[in-house]
Amino acid sequence: MKGKFITFEGIDGAGKSSHVEWLAESLRARGLVVQVTREPGGTELGEKLRTLLLNEPMHLETETLLMFAARREHLARLIEPALARGEWVVCDRFSDATYAYQGGGRGLDRAKFLTLERWVHEHLQPDLTLLFDLPLDIARERIAVASRVLDRFEQERADFHERVRQAYLERAHANPQRIRVVDANKTLESIRKTLEQIVITNCL
Ligand code: TMP
């Protein structure tokens, strides 16, 4: 059986990351080999690029190119080999995040996004993307109580995050087969039940 590529997406504070490891564990309990990874990051070089991307001010196109540079490395070293071995890959963010943050949030020209997406992974898209959606004020509240140093993206104003959210929803609307919107304003238990149903229906 060929491996599956599942990605998690959503605005900062949507709570997706707490479900990534849980989903991987529940897939492992079914006997599958699962790699858990994230973007930007996932490789040694990618994690170095992540530190730059989350902390250093830079031009929008530099930011976009570095996101895709980290992604190229991630695909070549981790994602593609794992899928070829028949393993599953569960990844916290992928190109939909570039579409939403650099495109929606910062206004990157969509044609430039499409050029890079085609260059870096023309023949690969996630088999399934779980988009965690919730109202901005609730997400902002969750970030505020996290009491840690906020990264460059988390520090952005509310209107930036609203544009990110809308871009994600627009992308989901355009790709209804691949991107499933999950209401993240539910209990942990109810979200997990939903995730399990979506994954079973779409991937197993
Ligand atoms: P994380 O907090 O979910 O690990 O993601 C790190 C930040 O990077 C998050 O605020 C979203 C941002 N990001 C982009 O702006 N573009 C991208 O392509 C990716 C993968 C992440």
Image (tube, rainbow, N blue to C red):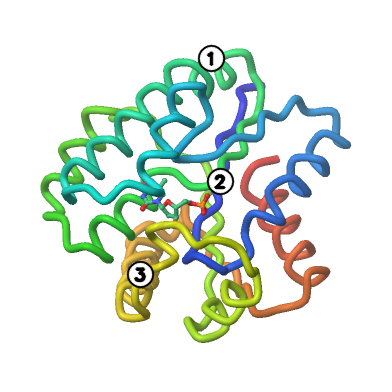
Q: Is residue 11 left or right of residue 87?
A: left
Callout 3: 10 Å neighbours few (<14), some, many (20+)? Answer: few
Give me the residue at 39% from left, 71% from top.
165
Q: Are marks 2 and 1 in contact (CB under 8 Å)?
A: no
Q: Amino acid at mark 2?
A: Asp
Q: Tell me the kind of residue under disc 3.
A: Glu
Residue count near mark 2 (Cα–Cα under 10 Å), binned few <14, some 14–19, many ≥20? many
Residue displayed at 38% across by 48% down: 55
The disc placed on residue 92 is: 2
Q: Secondary structure at mark 2?
A: strand
Q: What is the quadrant of the N terminus in the image?
A: top right
According to the image, label 1 marks what residue? 81
Give the mark toward the camera: 2 or 1.
2
| Viewer-closest of 78 and 175 | 78
Question: What amino acid is found at the position of numbered circle 1 in the picture?
Answer: Pro
Q: Is residue 127 above or below residue 138?
A: above
Residue 17 rendering spot, x and y as whole percentages: 64, 54
Residue 161: percent from the left, percent from the top?
A: 37, 73
Front position among marks 3 and 1: 3
- Report the residue marked by disc 3: 156
